[in-house]
Amino acid sequence: MIFFVFVFSLLPEKETTKQPTPEGSGVEGISVSASIKIQEIAFKVYPEKRIPKSGNWDTIADFNVYCKKTGKKCFSDTISTNNEGIGILTLNPGNKITSGNNSVIIKGISHLSKVYPNVPFIRMYENYDFTVFGDLLAGDTHPSYDDFINSLDISTLINNLNSNDYVSDLNGDSFVNSLDLSIQVYNISRTGEKV
Ligand SMILES: [Ca+2]
Ligand SMILES: [Ca+2]
């Protein structure tokens, strides 16, 4: 035993490789949370008034981040959410999202934008359940996708009556009919939230 300890002590000490200091991390060797790069974001949103009422929350969502540090949009992507309302975004290592509390805006393909302020971006793998803040409001069905529900959206939906058009099928029962139209009429003149 003593022999082995002796031999080990004779081995050259392994040179420690210096890690490059991430930009803005301050003093070398001190880990600062500001240098963490987000790699994956899982989020959950519910589009409103779905039939059946649960396990039927898919949509196609625009996911935007406005970074507090720059005051600008720093990330944007579009992803299909699954029946549970979950979308998972894999981020490019060069993404511009800064650590800290940022604002998230989500717009569904036939839904108005909803703002979620002060969302913490502090871990490499983030997981946000936005359903607690309410559902996405349905009715923005016109191809202009203008985040405003008006007569253009209504005429688009009426043109799609008796079809299975994904955008106009607001309640997700795979058929466009008066139930979808009534959801839309209820939200007439509403606009999406802005940061
Ligand atoms: Ca519209
Ligand atoms: Ca429907």
Image (spheres, helix red, strand yellow):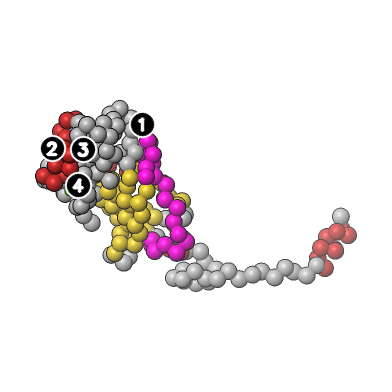
What amino acid is labelled 2 in the image?
A: Val
Give the foreground label among 4 and 3: 3
The answer to whether mark 4 is within 8 Å of ligand 1 is yes
Q: Is residue 100 left or right of residue 135?
A: right
Residue 38 percent across, percent down from the top left: 44, 57
Residue 11 percent across, percent down from the top left: 80, 67
Using the rendered image of the protein, determine whether residue 171 is visible from the camera's viewpoint: no
Which residue is under mark 4? 142
What residue sits 51% from the left and 64% below the top?
A: 31
* Cα gap from disc 4 to disc 1, whole angstroms: 26 Å
Vertical relation: 96 (above or below) 146: below
Q: Within the magenta stretch, is there residue 83? A: yes
Q: Quadrant of the C terminus?
A: bottom left
* Cα gap from disc 3 to disc 1, whole angstroms: 24 Å
Q: Is residue 113 left or right of residue 43?
A: left
Which residue is under mark 1? 55
